[in-house]
Amino acid sequence: MAEKKAKKKSFLQAQRGRVLWAHRWLGLISGLVVFIVSITGCIYVFEEELRDIFQKKYYHVSTDGHTARQPLEDVSAALYKAFPDASVRQIRFDEAAGATIQYFTKDSKVISMNPYTLEVAGVRSTKTDFFYWILDVHRHLAWGDIGSEIIKWNVLIFFILCVSGLIIWWPKQRRFFKQAARIKFQRKNLKRLNWDLHSVLGFYALAILLLISLTGMFWMFDWVKDGVRLATATPAVREAKIQSQPLDGKTYTIEQAYSQAIANYPRPEKVVLINAADEPKAAIRVLFRYPYTVVRKQSTFFYDKYSGQLLKAAPYSADTPYDKVAKANYQLHTGNIPSLGIGSKIIYFLASLFAASLPVTGVIIWWGRGKKGNKKKVSRPVQVATAA
């Protein structure tokens, strides 16, 4: 019996050693990317709040003396009067009072219009905007397709690091759990303190980091989407591509599409996004977002860019279980969960900050082990007794 237990213990130790080896080298390979992605994630958690502080003029205007905003057609007409060559690819605005209407152009400009006075509230470029740059670094390392591919596989590696880290951290006996979950700042041994910072901070951030990595994988890998479909018992439905049918001499504007959607469907209480149809057969896309807790309540409508015919309506009331998971994915990844308020953002900020510290403390652990291994053993001189 004792021999059987000894063999089992030896086997588990061997497996733990393999996990530790994989954790160490995957961490060293992906450490720099994890640090960059985590730091940019920390900043982007509070994107909305920071924009309201530093870029307020682009998003908010005074409503003094105005009871209602002007029709979207009039706001667009004022835009084209000020910028005759503007080519709009998207219109975005909040239904709240005092919100600007933002026009995204093909030359990377964002023009904010005052919907009450029909004046230009501000112009900025997505190429130089700090928060767009942070998002580009977070998603692509500001390196285009190559960066996207690196991020894609790094997300998978990070998930493996989270799981392997939990296996390494897990105490061998239950009575050691409390000790393993506490940082002993009074330690005089800095290496042990660094180990505590790496293992304990990683443990406390683990649940959020696993959620962040899983939601990131949902965006990156089709097999994760297929797994969600299987888990939610939602069959994949192959739908015909939504296309406009060209008609000579006829065009339907994005402003008209918005007016038609407003007339036929519940008015949104949150955000409106209207995408222009850039390709000859593309459709105009109008998105209405309503108040929600975790799962985004948003309805999407597609209109023929020539005839104005409604090609498809996808109200949120018809969402499948898979659709609900997909619409909650952004909130669960970023911590922007309305039902939890600023609290969820603070938790995600701290988790991302802890994640950024893990490659640093991990490298220090690895470097310390290497230095320890390189120390030469000092042999003590053997005293030889001599005869008197």
Image (cartoon, grey):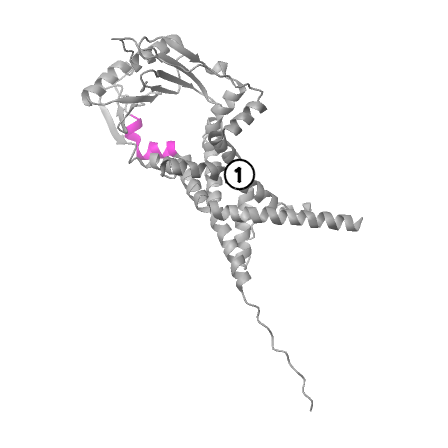
Front residue of 43/220: it is 220
Quadrant into which the C terminus falls: bottom right
Q: Is residue 159 left or right of residue 120?
A: right
Front residue of 158/72: it is 158
Q: Which image quadrant is residue 60 in?
A: top left
Q: Which residues are magenta?
A: 47-60
Q: Position of residue 36 (x, y in %)?
A: 41, 43
Q: How many marks?
A: 1
Q: Is residue 182 among the parts visible in the rendering? A: no
* Residue assigned mark 1: 159
Residue at image location 36% in from the left, 36% down from the top: 144
Residue 192 sits above or below residue 256 on the image? below
SS at badge 1: helix
Q: Position of residue 141 (x, y in %)?
A: 38, 39
Q: Which image quadrant is residue 306 in?
A: top left
Q: Which image quadrant is residue 304 in?
A: top left
Residue 124 on the magenta segment: no
Q: Given the image, on which type of amino acid does mark 1 rest?
A: Phe
Residue at image location 61% in from the left, 48% down from the top: 18
Residue 358 sits above or below residue 73 on the image? below
Q: Position of residue 291 (x, y in %)?
A: 44, 20
- The residue positioned farthest toward the right in the image shown: 1
Front residue of 224/347: it is 224
Residue 131 sits above or below residue 201 on the image? above
Q: Main secondary structure of the magenta part?
A: helix
Q: Position of residue 376 (x, y in %)?
A: 55, 67
Label 1 crowd (10 A; few <14 / some 14-19 / many >=20): some
Q: Is residue 205 among the parts visible in the rendering? A: yes
Residue at image location 32% in from the left, 13% down from the top: 305
